[in-house]
Amino acid sequence: MKKKNKNGFIFVETIIVTAVLLASLMVIYALYVTTIVSENRRLRYDDTAKLYETFYVKKYLESFDLEMLKKEIKDNTKYRIIYKSRSDIFGTSYIEESIFYGKLWDQLNIKNIYLLSNDISNIVKCTSGLSAICSNRNLLSYLKTLDDSAAKTYRLVIEFANAMNGGECTATDCFYYYSSVLVGD
């Protein structure tokens, strides 16, 4: 009779120890996943080097007609995509500048440049007419981390695409980095 009680106690003790170990492992795993996600965000969102590059691209674009693009945002949509081959920024008299802009784009591994209005809450919600932004889940995830409290400003967001091996970025081996700077009104 004593042997049965002892076996029952050992069984209950084993279940309790197993439950405590499982709970501990679940907490450790949750902390691990949180750390990995925050480290990815730290590396890919607003990296110091990318912020400097974004700042100087903004300064370069401000030397041309960035005001025209801001006016288009006020009149039409909540954002504007500035393309690599965008010749209307420079006009017809700045052929050399347009070539330099293309080389700058390639050298910095820029995929897209977005000029956004000050209110990004509607952009993040993906209201109508925002298909170019809504289809880019990485960009949406980055925009959700931004603060839209600056009332009378615009935001220049640059999406960088770097390859894992440092070479030419293809669809399968790209890492996307995002940074943004405010553009005053």
Image (cartoon, rainbow, N blue to C red):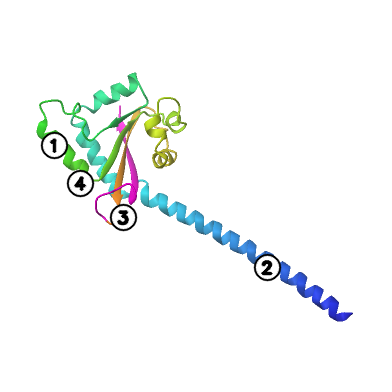
The residue carrying pointer 3 sits among few (fewer than 14), some (14 to 19) or many (20 or more) residues within 10 Å by Cα, namely few
Image depth: mark 3 or mark 1 in front: 3
Q: Give whichever of discs 3 and 1 has the lower sequence position.
A: 1
x, y percent for residue 162:
29, 49
Q: Name the residue under label 1.
A: 99
What amino acid is at disc 2? Answer: Thr
- Label 4 element class: helix
- Label 1 element class: helix
The residue carrying pointer 1 sits among few (fewer than 14), some (14 to 19) or many (20 or more) residues within 10 Å by Cα, namely some
Label disc, if present, on residue 107 of the rendered structure: 4
Q: Is residue 172 magenta?
A: yes
Inter-mark Cα distance, 3 to 2: 41 Å
- Label 2 element class: helix
- Magenta-tinted stretch: 166-185
What amino acid is at disc 4? Answer: Gln
Label disc, if present, on residue 18 of the rendered structure: 2
Q: Mark 3 points at which residue?
A: 164
Q: Which of 129 and 31 is in front in this view?
A: 129
x, y percent for residue 89:
20, 28
Label disc, if present, on residue 45 of the rendered structure: none
- Label 3 element class: loop
x, y percent for residue 141:
43, 41
Inter-mark Cα distance, 2 to 1: 66 Å
Q: Residue at x 68, y 68 (%)?
A: 18
Inter-mark Cα distance, 3 to 1: 27 Å
Q: Do the residues labelled 4 and 3 touch (CB within 8 Å)?
A: no
What amino acid is at disc 3? Answer: Met
Q: Give whichever of discs 2 and 1 has the lower sequence position.
A: 2
Taking 119 as reference, is 49 above or below it?
Answer: below
Inter-mark Cα distance, 2 to 4: 55 Å
Q: Does the magenta stretch include residue 175?
A: yes
